[in-house]
Image (spheres, rainbow, N blue to C red):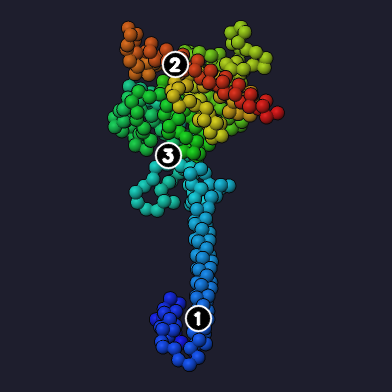
Amino acid sequence: MGFLLSKTESCISIPQKILNTMRSPLKSGNIIVHKEAMKTTIAFFVGCVFGLFIGLSLTKLNLSSNLSNEHHKLNESTKIWVPTNPRGAERLPPKIVESQSDFYLRRLWGLPHQDLRIKPKYLVSFTVGYDQRDNIDAAIKKFSENFTIVLFHYDDRISEWNQFEWSKKAIHIAASKQTKWWYAKRFLHPDIVASYDYVFIWDEDLGLEHFDAEEYLKIVKKRGLEISQPGVDLSSDFTWQMTRKKDGVEVHKEAEEKDGWCSNPPVPPCAAFVEIMAPVFSRDAWRCVWHMIQNDLVHGWGLDFALRKCVEHAHDEIGVVDTQWIIHKSIPSLNNQGKAENGRTPGEGVRERCHNEWKMFKERMANAEAAQAQGHNSTN
């Protein structure tokens, strides 16, 4: 006995066909026919189950293969390029990553490679108020076109500076009543100034009549100074003997201070020391110093005592250039930006914070060094 399976019939419909046959009246040999029908039914069920099992297995295998391919494609699209990419850019193709910037002004027209007639190699920043405009105008003229000029304005007055032709090519950044170290931490990130060999971070009350920036840097390069400053004229107000201009020498790296201040070997302020009024940093030194500047300590007091930590050979690589010197006019401009309260003048409040910040910085540095030493000892 046989059955034809049409295109629309399935394993579910075939047994019904057999059962219909089994319900037909029995004739001669009906017992044999019944047995054959049962065998056929069982064979169909077994075949269907086996076919279903094979079909599901093939489907699962195909799905697994597809998922594996999709996972491989996903991994390829999100591959982490740890050896080459900076943090946050791991998923970018390395050749598109631009991790550094600069203050070069660009045009709105033409082609990018035509924008710059000259690429300045150095950067000088002054933190200024408009009242010191004439002094800054005279100072800027001591810097050649090899310098990018950045002015940080603590009094919010910017447009008035356009009376000076050089001001139109300078970078102007304004934030009310902020210090130069506040600006430096936020706008002179090492990756932003990476194009410059040296970075000057100077006060606004400096007289530069005896200073030439290009000549100064020639000496700095010749003497291998990573951190430096010009000598301060003897007619100026000064705090430390180390910064006083010395006659008859090109550079000095040590000075005599008050009794008991200078150990052997000498440490700041007797050696490996420049003040925060007019420091000059090499690119590598500035990268270290920037990380040492505390985000909330804005006056920078105490920072000059720790600068030596940012060079390998402090007694050789930190010095004062005597043949290019400056006059410190000691104009307390920021004192006037303070707030009079509790019976004290604005300047008294500013001065108090300066001293407090110095104490806080020393404590943080001491705690950091102690923690480092303890961690080092625990690994030995």
Q: Is residue 111 above or below residue 146?
A: below
Q: Which residue is mark 1?
A: 38
Q: Which residue is mark 2?
A: 354
What is the spatial separation of the Cα atoms under label 3 and label 2, in whole angstroms?
30 Å
Q: Is residue 63 above or below residue 135?
A: below
Which quadrant of the structure image shows residue 241? top right
Amino acid under label 1? Met
Marks 1 and 3: which is nearer the front?
1
Amino acid under label 3? Phe
Location of the C terminus by quadrant is: top right
Q: Secondary structure at mark 3?
A: loop
Q: Position of residue 31 (x, y in %)?
A: 50, 86
Disc 1 packing (10 Å; few <14; some 14–19; many ≥20): some
- Whether label 1 touches label 3, CB < 8 Å: no
Q: Is residue 5 above or below residue 259?
A: below
What is the spatial separation of the Cα atoms under label 1 and label 3, in whole angstroms?
92 Å
Which residue lies at the image location 52% right of the left edge and 55% below the top edge?
75
Q: Secondary structure at mark 1?
A: helix
- Whether label 2 touches label 1, CB < 8 Å: no
Disc 3 packing (10 Å; few <14; some 14–19; many ≥20): some
Q: Which residue is mark 3?
A: 103
213 or 337: nearer the eye? 337
Which residue lies at the image location 50% right of the left edge and 15% below the top edge?
359
Left or right, 129 with reference to 294:
left
What is the spatial separation of the Cα atoms under label 2 and label 1, in whole angstroms?
103 Å
